[in-house]
Image (cartoon, coloured by chain):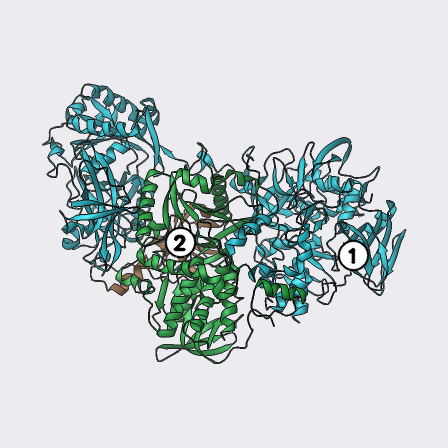
Chain colours: A green, B brown, C cyan
Amino acid sequence: MTRRYSAFSLLKEGLAGQTGWAPAWTSPSPKKNYDVIIIGGGGHGLASAYYLAKTHGIGNVAVLEKGWIGGGNTGRNTTVVRSNYYYPESVALYGLSHRLYEGLARELNYNIMLSQRGMINLCHSAIEMEIATRTVNAMQINGIDAELFSAEDVRRVAPIFNFSSQARFPVFGGVWQGRAGTARHDAVAWGYARSASGLGVDIIQNCEVTDFIIEGGCCRGVVTSKGAMRAERIGMAVAGHSSVLAAKAQFRLPINSYALQACVSEPVKPILDTVVASPGTGVYVSQSDKGEMVIGGALDRIPSYGQRGSLPVLEGVIAGLLEMFPVFGQLKLMRQWAGIVDVVPDSSPIIGPSPLPGLFLNCGWGTGGFKAIPAGGTLLAHLLATGKHHDISRPFDLDRFSTGRLIDEAAGSGIAH
Amino acid sequence: MQIFNCPFCGPRAESEFHYGGEAGNLRPDGADVPAEDWANYLYMRANPKGATREVWLHVTCGEFFVMERDSVSHKVHSATAIADTSEAK
Amino acid sequence: MSASRLPSGGSAIDRSRAVSLSFDGREIEAFYGDTIASALLANDVAVVGRSFKYHRPRGIWGAGVEEPNALVDIAGRGPNMRATTEPARPGLIARSVNAAPDALNDTRAFLDRFARFIPAAFYYKTFMWPDWHRFEPRIRAMAGLGKVDPAWKAAKAADRINHHCDVLVVGAGSAGLAAAKLAAQAGKSIMVVDEQSTAGGSLLHRDGEIDGQPGPQWAEETVAALKRDGHQVLTSTTAFGIYDHNLVALNQRHHDGRPDTLWRVRPRQVILATGAIERPLPFANNDLPGIMSADSALVYLRRYGVRVGRRIVIATNNDSAYEVAGALAKAGAEVTLVEMRKGPLPAAPEGVRRLAGRSIVSARGRMRVDGVTLDDGIALPADCVLVSGGATPTIHLYAQAKGRPVWNEARAAFLPGDPVDGITLVGAAMGDTKDGILATWPDARMKGRVWIDYQSDVTAKDVALAARENFVSVEHLKRYTTLGMATDQGKTSNLPGLALMAGITGRSVPETGITTYRPPFTPVPFTSFAGLNGGELMAPVRRLPLETAHRARGAVFQEYGGWLRPAHYGGADAERAIQEEARRARRSVALFDGSTLGKIEVMGPKAAEFVDFIYYNTMSTLKPGRCRYGFMLAESGVVFDDGILVRLDEHRFIVSCSSLHVASVHARLEEWRQDRFGRDAVYIHNATAEMATLTVSGPQSKPLLAALDLGLSLDDRDLPHMAVGEDRFGTDRLRVARVSFTGDRSYELSIRADRAEPLWVRLKEAGKAFDAVTIGLEALMILRAEKGYIVIGKDTDGTTMPHDLGVAGPRIKRQSDYVGRRSLFTEVASKDDRLQLVGLAVAESEPPLPAGSHGVTRDKGMTRSQGFVTSSHMSPTLERPIALGLIERGASRHGEAIDIRHLGTVRRATITPPCAFDPEGERLNA
């Protein structure tokens, strides 16, 4: 069986009619007992399982996914990877993730197509440039490769942007991160799944958690559509459904779930070489390696688990896109989708023990969970392996809402990230 | 484009409305409210999947009201002026 | 020659009007009414493009929106246009996509020879060493279909139209028109839409009579009758999406160069008569140009007078292809019908040779098909192969509306399941057909390369590979192979792919899953969504009542928080002009238009209690006729807004808030009013837009106002600082508040916005004697910075609390509750290392510190930020730079030096109190 991926294996299997490829992951029947159970088979859940096995040597792990792995927010993504954040705590978190992304393809033996062609967050006024200056300086002090771009610099990286004198949002400059870019979302999920499965993790799909097994005030396991399972520690990485599971464990979270839309145009030959975000329009766009323009904007501001967005929000996003790139007016909308994002008041994630002992949280990523998958996985794995916080996850504990120690990145990033 | 029923103006497009939070989140008054309770009021939410009870503002007329709807199907069940809700009474 | 235009026939074309267009540089003769596709077929153009990955030649497959292959770039119009729905226009220049130099001679055609080494998902298995960036540019250059024309300009904005009606009928075929007719007879208001350019659906190309009339005629008359009765019938219009509460979105194409129109329709009831889409048949090399949908061939024959071949093989698993066979035979083609079913069959049409119980196993040809081989070994020459694999009911809108499709084994299709409120399906979309069908899905055992998705280049072997690697759900199958993700969104490929996966994994089709249906049904131009929303009309700026006067005075405008306001007046050198304005303001008197300032009236029996609750500061002790500066906090304790509260009398207050926050402050006030105090306890009125506020500030402000003869006493005993009086300017009510944002003696005059101009003019006239200067916002910002007066959102951020700004009194002293109070005593609110408002000074000779630079310190060998510079200016008053900032423990560090870092460069500054000028405040009464 061909397990290892490489140009050579493609050559070999090409000659063998593709018959020797091993399954990317197994489809085991669930066991009754595990060391650790992770609820949620998206990027974060799968990454957590991988790091548990790889870094902590704990392979007796189950990842329970109610649908098909990578089918939630991970599969409905605009795939931006960046670490240009303001507060040192955030920098530590997203910086870790960014660095892990940079080595991930080789580590997982899976081409995640990390494309670091940079990202520019535009400024449309002198005041915005002042805020950008504040942001860039904070980032540079914290060791992030952020640069303050002038309007000329922006023109260099995005020549087809609307620089006309009629533009509604004139370009004054922006915040640039050269190492930012995109990655293939499915590959990230599948890459982690394959490696985790290879290390002995059971990935159980079509398995919905319906309740927790609580004994002596502690979480001892879960009840699922495929039976009950027990474990020492249980992690939750279910994004927009976090409140639903929290309710089963009798606690609440500072989360509101909303639909976040994204869409793609038909594929065209390369014309946009970087990720461009405008706070004026609230829209950001990049061109995928398949040629499609991948477009994202602000949330649909009606609490929803419906995974579908409204037409007026879509119209606003596309209008914003055309204001930024008038030449895209010749393109068509090909596909559109929405996920369920778990929005937290300070737009920072919640990582740490839940109020129910034995149950650990990884949620609250809102619209920005994709870039944090490697870090979220690392940090949740650490919690599940040791029962304690990693230094980097400590500030993101749920208790920050009681102490008031919010990490409010709203100043730091412009649009809903 | 969803249609919501402002109790005062009737059915209007969703773009005329602004979400005002979960209904029933009563403010604990006083300077010595326990930190936990204050955090619950400020931040903790039920965020239900399914039947919800929410405060909404009809921006056009400025009136706040409580709407019962479903966060999955987006069906709207009822809309009641704040003064007429059980919490108010 | 194989495909050709017949000498007569074709209901859609006008043979008296010739049209000439070009494709890949070749001249194409056509007629008015042709589509680009029918024109190409009439000229026997077989190869119209190249497939996405392997660059295999692609020919026209169908005649409608489900077309996977015939995409062209049209000069001046755009890339990736469907040749099957784009009209042939005179002078149109079309180029094939994904081919260079053209479709026939593509330099990347060699890729197909390496196909076995680049199967589905191959790119995940390689390109890791040294890293993806090495390979990415080449892969990107090969990806994409058409080209964006960087010189393209929108001719005109698209229209977006809202429409209400009783019944929306989607699809004007026999079922749809019949339903519309019935509903109209019942007195309902109707809208009918159809994506073809003429209503009638399959009536236009299939034999049939309705009510004794030939199909096309019945359709024409039904449509005419509907229009006569005032109902809407839109053709070339696709209903592409259905949204919550049954809003249906339509994209209407025009044939006169106008951009497509977006319709938003809110019907009480939706009738989906959306028909069905013909499926291909699986066999080796079934992607060769010249292999087409059988039904489409009939469309080309009857609508466009084009016979798609001379020696035609038609393979079918259902009855519908029989009519096609017969018609083509009558049109002079040599037709062989390969009937896949056994058992009792309909009669073979005249002139058609039928081979029953057989199927095609492979097609032959290099750039186009030249023959097929059957399962019994027979080889048939053919210059065109038509396939009819059955029809998949078009249930997209039903499924978008959360309808649950149900698998029907007998029909080999997903049919609508439980009804959805307000939506009915009729006709072929219901699976309503008398046709008997044999399911003929692709099978993993088929030999050769059997194509499933023509555009994405997905074969049956790719599906088998996906299964082998455990990508067995329909979601994983789609993403792994990219099946169904091309511009046709899998209309002809989703179901065969799904059925194949089901077969391979030993599951039923429904067990394997069904893809989620989402809008848009077919690609919709971006311009349709954007409409007029762009340029000036996007988030339009708000304008001052006195804008014209300011422009006449030479104001240079900037956008501030959504308002268009004078930044400064005149002068080629902006920096110099602003400094001069600020200098003169302190010397004599300045005139400033502050009309954007929020003015929200709060009145009622509980108004005093109300303002005590809303503000951080105690306000109920304010005397009538007096003003007080205060903060409004968010419940998190963060300073949300600041401003003056004016008390007019016991039960009337005016909340002034910063321009940026007027709407949100108003909403907050209303919420507390309705949800805590009671509707009769207090009333709120947002008078911001009703009143203009003109500021007169400076040592000469009092004499200037005295010259206006306002009637009210300007004596400092009658109108001290922070007091308010009312009087008149002519016949207009005028409120005069002595408040200051400059630190100088200052008066804010509020008058009805539409009466502001005479007052402004009078002020300027009278001001001449006092050397008055009109100042813009930039100069004002300097003046207030010299005094250490904050601007919310600039000198505060999302964490700043009132005690950080030096206002600690209420936090310590107030007994009554107010918004945000409890949050001022959390752990973090009580920390001793919070960022606090300070001034920052540098040497006179140095340039000002950049706003946004950070105060830094070194901590355990690491540089750490201790805060940042929030405002920074050259002060003309002090003739040195001044700055404000938020610095850790700043209030207790006055006099200390601090390192300030900006983009790597470090300078030294001194921490000072925020107020740099006249700290005693003497100039307020000067």
Quadrant in the rendering for residue A19 = bottom right
Question: Disc 1 vs disc 2: which is toward the camera?
Answer: 1
Up the image or down, C102 lies above or below A384; here it is above
Image quadrant containing the N terminus of chain A = bottom right
Residue C808 placed where, x, y %?
16, 51
Q: Which mark is residue C363?
A: 1
Side of C830 where C443 appears, left or right? right
Q: Nearer the viewer, residue C453 or C321?
A: C453
Q: Nearer the viewer, residue C492 or C733?
A: C492
Residue B68 placed where, x, y %?
43, 57
Quadrant in the rendering for residue C693 = top left
Q: Which residue corresponds to the image point at 34% horizontal and 45% vertical from the top-left?
A: A132
Q: Nearer the viewer, residue B70 or A236?
A: A236
Up the image or down, C124 lies above or below C710; here it is below
The reply to whether the C-beta atoms of the residues labelled 1 and 2 are less than 8 Å apart is no
**Amino acid type shown at disc 1:** Ala
Q: Is residue A290 visible?
A: no
Q: Is residue A101 visible?
A: yes
**Amino acid type shown at disc 2:** Thr
Residue A138 placed where, x, y %?
31, 51
Q: Nearer the viewer, residue C379 or A254?
A: C379
Residue C792 placed where, x, y %?
26, 44
Q: Residues within 10 Å of mark 1 (few under 14, many from 20)?
A: many
Residue projecting furthest to the right: C351
Query: Element at badge 1?
Result: strand
The number of discs equals: 2
Up the image or down, C365 lies above or below C163; here it is below
Q: Which mark is residue C180?
A: none
Which chain does tag 2 point to? B
Q: Which mark is residue B80?
A: 2
Query: Element at badge 2?
Result: strand
